[in-house]
Amino acid sequence: MGKQQEYALEIMDVKKSFYENLVLDGVSFELKPGEILGFLGANGAGKSTLMKIITGVYKMDSGMIKINGNQVSGEQISKIRENSVAMVYQEFSLIPSMTVTENLFLGSELKKHGLIDEKRQELEAKNMFKEFGIDINPSVAVEELSIGNQQLVEIVKALMKKPLVLIMDEPTASLANNEINLLFKFMRKLKQNGISIILITHHMQEVLEVCDRVIVLREGKVVMNRITDELCIDTMVEAMVGKAILSKDVLQKKGINNTQRVLLEINNLYWQSKLNNINFKVHYGEVVGIVGLLGSGRTELLKCLYGLLTPTKGTIIFDNKQIEHKLTPEKAIKIGMCYVPENRRKNGIVAIHSVENNMLMSIWNRILNYGIINKKISMQKVYDMVKNIKIKCVNKDQEIRNLSGGNQQKVVFAKGLLINPKLMILDDPTVGVDVEAKESIVKIIREFTNRGSAVLLVSSEFDQLEKICDRILILKEGSVKKELQYGRDCINEITISEAVQLN
Amino acid sequence: MIKKFNYKKYIVYISFIIVFTVFSIVLKDKGFSSPANLMNILRQTSMISVAAIGMCFAISAGLIDLSIGGVISITALLVALLLKYSISVPVAVTAGLGMGALCGAINGGIVAKVRIPSFLVTLGTSTIFAGASRIMTNLEAVPITNKVFNNVFGSGNIGPISSLFIWTLIMMTIGHIVYKKTSFGKAVLSVGGNESAARYSGINVDKTKFWTMVICSISASFAGIMYAARMHGARYTLGENDVMSVIAAVVIGGTSFSGGKGTIVGTIIGSIVIGILNNGLLLMGLSVSEQMIARGVVIIIAVSLSLRESRD
Ligand SMILES: Nc1ncnc2c1ncn2[C@@H]1O[C@H](COP(=O)(O)OP(=O)(O)OP(=O)(O)O)[C@@H](O)[C@H]1O
Ligand SMILES: [Mg+2]
């Protein structure tokens, strides 16, 4: 590592455009050894792009980068990248079919007589997990892990090469609270070892909790660079958005009463060993939140409702009709449901397709004119959505993989909304979405139910649940353990997390 | 900042121009660029073009059909036999296309229901279909004497334009519209681009795959009908060596081999590139074996150019 320099990383006047789209407009900042830097900015501000430039995935158009005092340019980048900067990407880079150990050692396998020494690799992986206090079996395939655990493996993998600077692009987006705490714990441990960390996130309270300093990027420029101690959430948000978010709209909630019509009724639902006798109702106009730890069966429950899994036992009554056993997503959409999945890249988007094709994927057959797609209507629909939920894209034909992560998520949400369903099933719909857009999505959800439809919402963000849910079901080991109801119980972050922890 | 030229999008036109220019210069004395020879190229290419339209659907959906050779010869023989027994042309042609649909339904049914990759399914059915076409007439050729059939589907002309080429244009138009402007076309591309996301979005993945395989076979059977009409007869060898040309045409045309992206017009241009290549190598006086080697080399070059990812 050489002798200690004043800065682990120096960024000087970095500029980058994609075709005509200027993304970084002269970014400069420094990072001290052992410093944890929070990196904030609205969706599409250029955060991921900047980090990819630092690690050498993209080339900058102009500017300078110094790592540990050494200027890096051109050919050196890949070497520097190998030695001193590690990055956990917003999109996962693990190979799903390989085991955790194989993934960790991919490209730098431990060898014995020229062959891979599986035993030693496995042992080292086990030790590493023990050191970080993670409970993952290194010999299972990555695809069998929960998203949260996959994320942890990803981070451990980045740490394998003992980097000087660790960059994490929204690592907490899909983690549960306890996993986030775990992550912060080893971030502090790394800090003690002199490793600098850049943390990109859309959660302000995380920044206050763990970061020493905060940089806010807006439209490709650094608009704030301050010590965390001087800051509060409102100042950061203001810097991100460019204006104070004025009204924290109080959303109108309803306490249900028994006279309201029932939209969805689930009786004695079982699925394999994951769901055990689930019973509940959703009324027209209601937002019902579902919380539970990983493995509580929340995703399985949603999948059963949407026809992605076939329940082993039990009945589902939707809109007064009992659902036949062979439900498929196609039929679910026809009878008036939509589903926003938690894993955007795998189940949400076709990466190489345009914004338009992604957004209209579910409704092409509704906008036909003598069998031919009506261009006017399709353009109008895309245009309206891009405007309403502020999707930042060059035009409707831009490939969705070239959108920023948060904007991709907005497109997936828009796709569900365009189905115009009676029931929206949302599995963490605001993953990676910035504060402002989150507010607007929450508002859209509420408006949507005010017009009579209902929402089932899984979210690990309790403040969001607090804000919009009429009712919250607490799921544990595959059954509903508790129900919090607006007007009867007190619903806030504390009561929700208490209920979740409850045995 | 200078706008980077995205050459990948135009690679098929670039290869077209390169291949055409090279042969025009090299084969100047042999009349390569004479109108007669150019029309001849279009005529020879038509069958590849039409089969490639269906293949474009299959590849776009993340599938592939290796059995089209057998479908071509079965259809051609069936139509020839029916015409021999004085069955009317519309009935014979419909029966031929029906045979294509049946072959496609077998492929598609196994792909969709048994969930075996299309590559393996059609690897198997390709020999089944080829074997069946040998059995049909005991390896005998069947001549077609029906002038109407031969003229309409093969050797006839409208003005200076071959009816084969007109059929190609018709099929291209239909294919293009279905591909770009219908919900089925969008479903095909979504399934090819990300099958799981397509399923979550309410697309019936199995149904889409099934019909894609059917379409692919039907277009191959139409190519078989065109072959029969052009040759005034059918033989089990028809289409035998076409599967590579057809797949190469689709890929050179700019369709992503991993699915999710493609173009029908590009596919037709891709076929014409293959056609020019076949014709040019022949005019150069190469032996059949030399032609095979040269063709393979050029196809690999062209395909690798169109598959190369452009990087930032
Ligand atoms: N490969 C690319 N090609 C073209 N444009 C791109 C590409 N990558 C990013 N962009 C554009 O650059 C801008 C910044 O994207 P970036 O991913 O850096 O945003 P971000 O700050 O990370 O946002 P988010 O919070 O949503 O992840 C966006 O407008 C995006 O469309
Ligand atoms: Mg990003």
Image (cartoon, coloured by chain):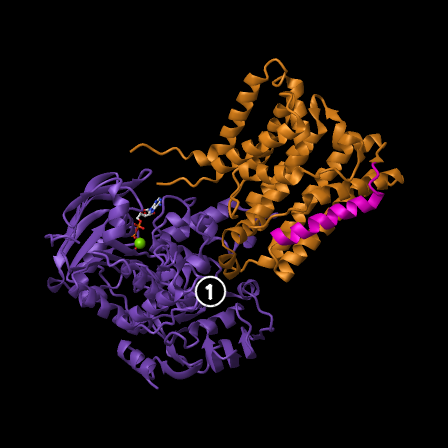
Residue B228 visible in the displayed image? yes
**Ligand 1 has an atom within 8 Å of the beta carbon of the residue at disc 1:** no
Residue corresponding to mark 1: A339
Q: What residue is rendered at 37% in x and 57% in y?
A: A106
Closer-to-camera residue (A327/B129):
B129
Residue positioned 24% across, 48% down in the render: A80
Q: Is residue A59 above or below residue A230?
A: above
Which chain is orange in the picture? B
User: Quick check: A473 left or right of B292?
Assistant: left
- State the image quarter where residue A330 is shown: bottom right
Q: Magenta segment: does it hold A306?
A: no
Q: Which chain is purple?
A: A
**Helix, strand or loop under label 1:** strand
Q: Residue furthest top?
A: B29
- Quadrant of ligand 2 in image: bottom left
Pinpoint residue A390: horizontal percent, then vertical percent.
34, 53
